[in-house]
Amino acid sequence: MTQDAWTIVSQHHNRLRDASLTDLFAQDPDRFQVLSRSLDDLTVDFSKERLDAEALDALLSLCSAAGVENRRAEMFAGAHINITENRAVMHAALRATADDGLSVDGTPTAEIIDPVLDTFLSFADDVRRGAVLSAGGSRFTDVVNIGIGGSDLGPVMVARALSPYRGQGPRTHFVSNVDGAHLRDVTSGLDPKTTLVIVASKTFTTQETMANATAARAWLVDGIGEGNAGLHLAALSTNLEATAQFGIQRDRVFGFWDWVGGRYSVWSAIGLSVALSVGGAEFRSFLEGARSMDQHFQTAPANQNLPILLALIGIWRRNFMGCPTVALIPYDQRLERFPAYVQQLDMESNGKQTTLDGQSVSYATGPVIWGEPGTNAQHSFFQLIHQGTDVIPVDFIVAAQSGSDLEEQHTALLANCLAQSEALAFGKSGDEVRSEMATKGHAEDEIERLVPHRTFPGNRPSTTILHKRLDAFTLGRLIALFEHKVFVQGAVWGINSYDQWGVELGKVLAQQLIPIVGGAKDASEKDSSTAGLVARIAELRG
């Protein structure tokens, strides 16, 4: 990054360090118009962030100095910007059309992607309409997706979000944890005679996934017999030899590519469970929504570009305000898994301490992302956000239109969302508390005793992302917004957002420990803590 541009942003932060949001709104009654942007029905309001137009201009200059536009062009051109694995980063191609002209390593991506897309969506629609049946000739009533990480978090989040569009499609269930309780709990209420199991693993070697897949296959065999199990299995993998050995028919294996990272793969065949749930037409609408954000990200000027602006707000919070976490709060129960999805998207991408040229970073990178749906969150951790000692920025997501027929409840939901952002920004002063309590007839000594406890400091930053209603197009657009936000922040920080070496060490050590925990080897070469815990586990397991 350019130090001069960084210094200028820092000067603006120093200028605004003691400014309150109350003062900033008083100084500029048109602050919402100045510090919000829209794309069709999607509005991002960052007027309740602790910055002003001048600071935003400095952030935009920082973005330019960091070469974000050039790196964006490289990504969409198919350059191998994932330098540690020598791979292109082309998840945007999964929702592009041939007219977009994308290619990777000299091959138009549409030539590679479209046949696979058409095939797995046709399979999904055939299952939904009963053209593909179970071994016993019945329709599949349930689908169990077995995966982990991006092969689970994306599909489970999207299927839940789009559940109103399921129609007559099968029920979808998801298993990710190697804890056998997860598989047992999911399958306990299902009938193997009418259940389709999807195994999602590119290499067909992922430890947790294959342990669950093997157990699920045994469950199928127990229920329908060895000869029929293959008719109840599908795979999302490129390892055709391994899938064949597992008993999965070739025409039920759907692949994807190494230039698609796991946390960016829901747009590919990894989304088969989503397509089975909502159908091919809705899945294509989901892709179209993401493509619309891709086009906006590529073409909109930086000062109107929603992913760029959202990313720069995050840079301001993380690097200049010093906020290590962000609470992501969707006021939509069907987005209950969205915070977990973005958590992986952001933290696995930008949880890095090394720059692209191999140097240690000298500044903070990816924040901790966490959250739960509102209004539940208001009754759990919002107390800390309002009156705790740390400033925790909040991103609110809310739809103007209800996803149910309970309109009065949706009005209350919207009011709660807006009220929280207002309360975080402006708080409640001691004088306001005194006046309110006096009006209610409290004694003066009681008022003074309670004022410190009932005072809200305010000046807590938040951004609100408002859209019309949650549907497949909107969800695709929303996910792509966060994908590109993560890209921009990684580009500004000068890190590789597309590898995840930090995930690997634990996997290697787990493989080493399996025979030790299982009793086949002793723990003498392990540290005293690990060895002691292994001994205690052996004692407790009897």
Image (cartoon, helix red, strand yellow):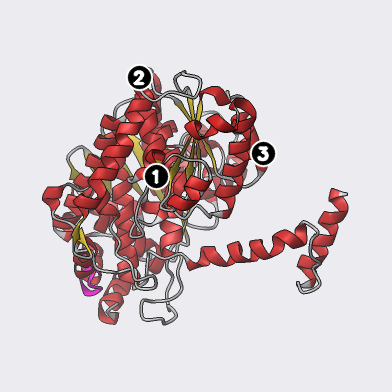
| SS of the residue under disc 2 | helix
Crowding around mark 3 (Cα neighbors within 10 Å: few <14, some 14 to 19, many 20+) is: few
Residue labelled with disc 3: 181
Residue 414 spot, x, y in % from top left: 36, 31
Question: Which of disc 2 and disc 1 is earlier in sequence?
Answer: 1
Instruction: Give the label on residue 407, or none.
Output: 2
In the image, taking residue 421 as reference, residue 474 lies left or right, namely: left
Q: Name the residue located 35 percent from the left edge and 64 percent from the top edge.
A: 315
Crowding around mark 1 (Cα neighbors within 10 Å: few <14, some 14 to 19, many 20+) is: many
Q: How many marks?
A: 3
State the separation of the CA atoms marked 3 and 2. Answer: 39 Å
Residue 30 spot, x, y in % from top left: 19, 48
Q: Name the residue located 34 percent from the left edge and 71 percent from the top edge.
A: 86
The span shown in magenta is: 63-67
The disc labelled 3 sits on which kind of residue?
Answer: Ala
Residue 536 spot, x, y in % from top left: 84, 58
Residue labelled with disc 1: 270
Crowding around mark 2 (Cα neighbors within 10 Å: few <14, some 14 to 19, many 20+) is: few
Can you say whether 156 is above or below 257 in the image?
above
State the separation of the CA atoms marked 1 and 2. Answer: 35 Å
Question: Which of disc 2 and disc 3 is earlier in sequence?
Answer: 3
The disc labelled 2 sits on which kind of residue?
Answer: Glu
Question: Which of disc 3 and disc 1 is earlier in sequence?
Answer: 3
Verify whether residue 59 appears in magenta: no
In the image, taking residue 385 as reference, residue 287 lies left or right, namely: left
